[in-house]
Amino acid sequence: MKKEIVNELKTRFPALSRNEGTARAIAAAFAMQRDPTVKEIAAVKTAVSEAVTNSIDHGYRDREGFVEMTLRLFSDGTLAVHIKDKGAGIENVGEAMRPTFTTAPAEEEHSGLGFTIMESFTDKLRVRSAVGRGTDVYMEIKLKGKLPPDTEDTRDA
Amino acid sequence: MLKIYNDGGRITAAITGDIDHHAARELRSALDEIIFSSRPDTLILDLEGVGFMDSSGVGLVLGRMKAVKAYGGRLILKNVGSDTAEVLRLSGLSRLIAENRTAAKN
């Protein structure tokens, strides 16, 4: 069966740390239409939180800007989360994805586990980044909840 | 948010709300104030009221653990939910969990 997009939501918000919780809540609410398990919702919230925090705390550490989060739900239950920023970017993505790697000063006590946790809570993770241009994190989480067959959306003509 | 229960050498800090990058900064300074003013033998972080924690919470726990350890104290995590436990497990901090939420209910 071909995967089709069932629903899509795009949000854009300024890089303020209070929006980390907002982004988690939006992603969790979007995932609810698939009737996910508590564990699946926790995975969505955690993965989103890590990616958005990276954008805000790393990407926009020394500049202002916006984070863009696009959520897509596919017919097979896959939730795709795409988080993009136009911030500082990551010099070496491979190195950044290693556990405990951090560019933050020691007194901020970053665990350096952001990507490790994203990887663990998602079924697919792809990170693209260019220094000075921004970072693009794409994640997929398979929601096993069933979409009832009679929930075909009605559309305005 | 943070509520403190002081029982001599043992101090329990009950945290409520999400522990993310946004909340961590305030929690860090509030906890450090307690640590440096009271130097408890045991600092218990009660996570009963924590619905969400990510890697910023791991940093918070690690930093407090080091601060308490530096003078010979210890840090314990109590009432850890299953999702938070998973984040802690990935961070290699499972050993700090004294009792989990399910066990506490029995």
Image: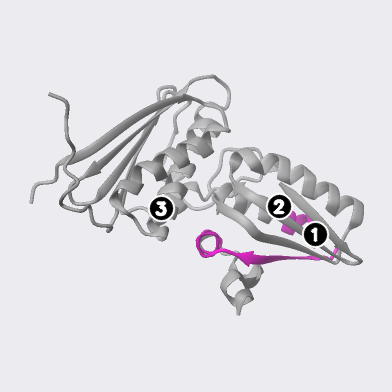
Please state the horizontal and vertical placement of residue A32, each as a whole percent of the image.
35, 48
Q: Confirm whether circles 1 and 2 share one chain.
A: yes
Q: Amino acid at mark 2?
A: Gly
Q: Amino acid at mark 1?
A: Val
Chain ID, mark 1: B
In reply to whether residue B79 is colored magenta, the answer given is yes
* Residue at mark 3: A41
Q: Which mark is residue B68?
A: 1
Residue shown at 64% from the left, 66% from the top: B79
Quadrant assignment, res A5 = top left
Which residue is located at x 21 percent, y 44 percent? Answer: A74
Please name the colour scheme applied to the rendered image: one colour
Within-10-Å neighbours for mark 1: few <14, some 14–19, many 20+: many
Q: Is residue B33 above or below residue B91?
A: above
Closer to the camera, A74 or A94?
A: A74
For the residues bearing labels 1 and 2, Cβ distance under 8 angstroms: no
Badge 2 and badge 3 both on one subunit: no
| Chain letter, disc 2 residue | B
Tell me the distance, in whole angstroms, between the alpha carbons under discs 1 and 3: 34 Å
Instruction: Give the Cα separation between the discs numbered 2 and 3.
Output: 28 Å
Residue A135 placement (x, y as % from top left) = 40, 31
Name the quadrant containing residue A39: bottom left
Residue A119 rendering spot, x and y as whole percentages:
39, 52
